[in-house]
Image (spheres, rainbow, N blue to C red):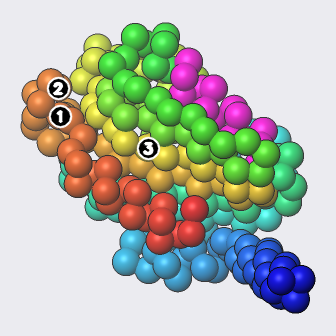
Amino acid sequence: MKKFLKALVLVLVFTFVFTLAGCSSKKAMTADKFTSIMKDYTVYILSRHDIVGDYDIDEARRAMGDDNGHFRPSALFIDFNSSSDAKKYYDTTTKASMNMINDEDLDATTTSKGSGDYQKFTVTGEVNYGFAFLASGDYEKFITEGKANAAYRDLYGDTYSVIIRDKNTVLFVYTEVKPYESGLDADAASISKKDVQDVDEIVSMLGY
């Protein structure tokens, strides 16, 4: 019986060690990997000046889908030189998103989960076109200028967006339905289940 218990303990110990080894061997996303995975999209190399804010950025890439009123998901990947800067960017972006929804009284739902090195935030529902500018931090400027535009309400549409921070990287994947470009009535421009699946597929494909 004692020999059996010792053998069982050894099995559990080895299982635990190999489990840890497997977790630690998961390689972090890099700009080159992002470009390779998103090869079917138009991928742009961004400089630190393309990201508004005082952040120490190693590399950044944006993959753009076709924009025809109801466009394929687009993705932004940022590799920061520190996890603190990644967290600062994530916190700023998600806070701006919440402010936009509350200030504009938009019909949108959000989710937030995770802690420590991993955080995930999603938005589903009505947004204005300024949401796409969240990634670069230009939302406040867009709203200031947009409200002076007589067609401001035409900038509303629906989105499904996912913002994730994993250690020192941030991934922002989103898709939008924009009635003012697709010719749809604003009430008819809504995110479909396929839109959600397409975004989630990219998130999964990129290992987040």
Q: Position of residue 205 (x, y in %)?
A: 47, 71
Indicate which disc, 3 or 2, sits on the residue closer to the N terminus.
3
Indicate which disc, 1 or 3, sits on the residue closer to the N terminus.
3
Circle 2 packing at 10 Å, graded few (<14), some (14-19), many (20+), is some
Q: Residue at x 39, y 72 (%)?
A: 41
Q: Residue at x 27, y 31 (%)?
A: 157
Q: Secondary structure at mark 3?
A: strand
**Magenta stretch contains residue 51:** no
Which numbered disc covers residue 189? Answer: 1
Q: Position of residue 48 (x, y in %)?
A: 74, 55
- Residue in the foreground of this view, choosing between 104 and 115: 115
User: Magenta span: helix, strand or loop, mainly?
Assistant: helix
Q: Measured along the vertical axis of the image, is residue 4 above or below residue 129? A: below
| Tags 1 and 2 touching, CB below 8 Å | yes
Image position of 132 (left or right of 115):
left
Which numbered disc covers residue 186? Answer: 2
* Magenta region: 86-99
Looking at the image, is mark 1 or mark 3 nearer the viewer?
3
Image position of 113 (left or right of 63):
right
- Label 2 is placed on what type of residue? Ala
Q: Secondary structure at mark 2?
A: helix
